[in-house]
Image: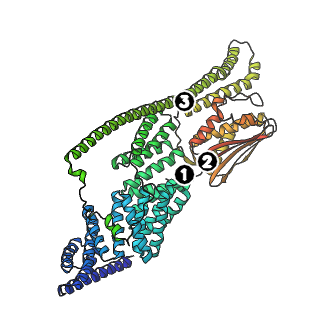
Amino acid sequence: MKQLLTLAVCLTSLFIFSQNEKIDQLTVQLAYQNQDSTKVDMSLMLINELYAIEDYSKALLYINQTSKLSEKLNYTKGLAESSYYRALIYTERNDYFNAIDNYNRSRKYYLQISDTLGVAKVSNSVGLIEIKRGNYAVGLKNSLSAINIFEKLGLRNELSSAYNNLAEAYFKTNQIDKAIDFNFKALDVRKVIKDSKGIKASTKNIADLYSIRKEHRKAIEYYENVLGILNPETDQDLRGEILPKLGSEYLRFNEYDKASMYLSEGLKYNRKQGNNEGLLRALNAVGKLNLQKRKVKLAELQLNEAYAIAQKIDNKTELLKNYKLHIALDSTRGYFQNAFFWQNKYYDLKEALAKVDQPVFPTDVDPLNLSNTNTLEDDLNTVKPKTHTKTSWLNSPLTLYGTIAALAILLTLLLFSWLKAEKYKDTLVEQKDKLAQEQQRNDAILEQTHHLEEVNQVKDKLFSIVSHDLKDSISSIKAFLDLLKEDSISKEEFNDLIPELSENANNASSLLFNLLNWSKSQMQNLEPKPDLFNIQEVFHNKMALVEQKVEDKRIVLIDESQRDFVYADKSMLEIVIQNLITNAVKFSRTGDVITVSNQDVNGKSLICVEDTGVGISRENIDKLFNANKNFTTVGTKNEKGTGLGLTIAKDLVELNDGRIWVESTQNVGSKFFIELPKAAPQS
């Protein structure tokens, strides 16, 4: 590596030395040259070398001398070239007024000597400036005229610049298809001339444009092409820009692994580089990713940081995205008042951005006719207007004053009409805004109403369970104890009733267990603490708890579990496994078989609790995981339930980034599946 760096330094030094040597030789030769056109040409060569090394001050000194000598000799080519170089230097210094003035002067001289290539060079440079200034029609006309000449003469470097100018102009005027076409043309030329910097810029532009046109697969292709050719030393900002964009494109297809890979890398990279623009884009995108994966707290931290950066650097486009993501975040958490706050900010900013005038690009603009001197001269700002002879009506003062008075009256009427129309327009806009705000408020209130109705249903469910099921179990236990206390039954009779008493106590305990966990999950107080643990140990512990019931019902319990690790909250998964095994026992008949197993499927742990019991009908399967359906059935020995066990299981599994489902056939049996990650997600 050191040898390569040393070689690079030596080559750079050699290049600078050879360039300086050439400048010195030209300077010496120029000093001894006669005051003729040859001296002008040599001076122009020296100016070109000074411009190339960006020594603009010295170049301007020689330009002024060359211009004076050319004027003295009446050497039009010297005047054209010196004006052109002066314009280039003013352009580099962002002095557009003087740049345009000198470009026009240069073009006028090139026209006098019929130097079409010179006129094309000027037109291309003028096109670039006018596009940057927002004068798109003038810029387009100049760039098109230059391209015609460059294509005929095969001047690839000039074509690269001209194609890029047009692509930028079409993009800024929302003509995406044309912008893509000219970016491809620029890319093809830049590949031929091996312009690595230009190739990266054009490829990145093409990816951006495909993304705008919603052709996201193509956008991914070209973003990845750019990443493949970036120089890690010199293209740091470009890499920081592309990584979050590429991650966002994959996120559109819910390809979370690839999206997470690029977004995480983009987040770390931009944070390390201190690139706020890239960091903002990455934070918004990774916040959206975590929101979709229901990692709400992590998403909140990332979106809040993005919000602070967007305000700091005043990036309104990303700020608008941030508002929309905050709406989704607070709606997910049930914070509807906060969501309404973000919604108002979103629509206010969206409306403000929509009011920004979008330039309209004329589609009927023709290139300048470089072979028609008169047409070009009319287009130049420096050409003086022709003088006209005054017509006879201007010689009459009364006619002139009358015309002015009529114009004044007409202008007054027009102004009054315009002001009146503007007033009506403002009133209409205000009324429209009020209606939109009312609609937003109504929507928010309606959403809150639905939420409150759901909460009410949950409350009714809780009261129903407490007032009936729990009351029945506890009342039954109390009745047994009262009988014993009052000596209404003998100890032998009481001993016979102990199994039933034990069953009632178990029912009450299970009911309280499920009620507590389910109510916690509904109030969003459960927070998983995931860790790696052996799933086989959980199976063994929970199977031991049902041994007595399995024996009583003469059920065959088969253990096909294997030692394997899952990444989840162990206590939560124990609750889920206990519910599934207890349910399997509850709905199995004498002689039925219950099998527990786990296996690795596509890098995730697939857990299964299978029974050959009574099964579940097709119409009841949809009710299993929904607490609001109030669905419960008795077991094969009239065991009671709350209908909450599977609801709790579903909530707890999803809190641990997993999923649960059932496959069942009535009178054949049921299979309950759980899919969970085997490792912590990559951040």
Tell me which residue sits at (35%, 64%) in the image: 128
- The kind of residue on which mark 2 rests is Leu
Would you identify the image quadrant in which residue 43 lies? bottom left
N-terminal-most mark, 3 or 2: 3
The residue indicated by pointer 1 is 252
Q: Position of residue 565 (x, y in %)?
A: 61, 51
Image location (x, y in percent) of residue 511: 64, 28
Q: Of the residues shown, which amino acid type is indicated by label 1?
A: Arg
**Is residue 440 positioned above or below 292 on the image?**
above
Q: Is residue 442 visible?
A: yes
Which residue lies under the disc numbered 3? 451
Label at residue 676: 2
Numbered disc 3: secondary structure: helix
Amino acid type of disc 3? His
Do the CB atoms of the residues marked 3 and 1 lie less than 8 Å apart?
Answer: no
Of residue 191 and residue 238, the one placed in the foreground of this image is 191
Secondary structure type for disc 2:
strand
Tell me the quadrant of the picture where the N terminus can be found.
bottom left
Residue 240 in view here? no
Residue at horizontal 63 percent and vertical 39 percent from the top: 576
In this rendering, position of residue 571 left or right of residue 482: left
Q: Position of residue 523 (x, y in %)?
A: 53, 32
Q: Is residue 430 left or right of residue 214?
A: left
